Amino acid sequence: MDEAWEVLTAAGLPEGPLRAVPPGPLDAGRLRAAVAALAAPSGDIDAWHAEPLLACLRGFKHHWPQRFATILGPAGDACMARAAALPADPNRYLKLRRIAIENLSHLL
């Protein structure tokens, strides 16, 4: 599952403060596979990763709904639902969502 988190981090998943996101086009196939792996019942989403994952997916879907549907489709919604079921700190979530949107804006 570490590979899935690495792919998501490269795609703008916020792990903390704002950081430079590698330039270049988003690898949609790898991103879709990573999100699908986490959306599966056997996917490993711990409480620490739930907030950044949820922030990134919700920000993606809210600001770029067509791209979200095209790139992630049902796996994106399923992964979002799994992450939303875990406990979250609303303040941390909000900060991470802002960072995720900024990161995604450079890749989409």
Image (cartoon, rainbow, N blue to C red):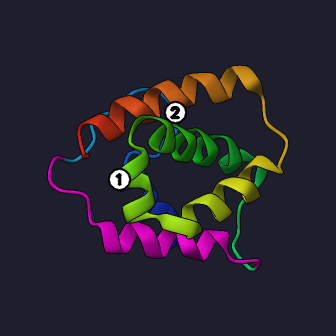
Magenta span covers which residues? 23-41
Q: Earlier in the sequence, mark 2 or mark 1?
A: 2
Other residues around mark 2 within 10 Å, as few (<14) / some (14–19) / many (≥20): few
Residue with the mark numbered 1: 67
Per the model, the C-alpha gap separating discs 2 and 1 is 25 Å
Tell me if residue 24 is in the magenta stretch. yes
Name the quarter where the N terminus is drawn. Answer: bottom right
User: Relative to the observer, which residue lies in front, 57 or 53?
Assistant: 57
107, above or below 31, in the image: above
- Can residue 1 be seen here? The reply is no
- Going by the image, does 40 lie left or right of 19? right
Residue found at x 26% / y 46% = 108
User: Magenta stretch mostly in which secondary structure?
Assistant: helix
- Three-letter code for the amino acid on which mark 2 is drawn: Gly
> Which quadrant would residue 26 be assigned to in this image?
bottom left
Tell me if residue 86 is in the magenta stretch. no
Other residues around mark 1 within 10 Å, as few (<14) / some (14–19) / many (≥20): some
- Three-letter code for the amino acid on which mark 1 is drawn: Arg
Closer to viewer: mark 2 or mark 1: 1
80, above or below 51, in the image: below
31, above or below 8, in the image: below
Residue with the mark numbered 2: 16
Residue found at x 59% / y 48% = 53
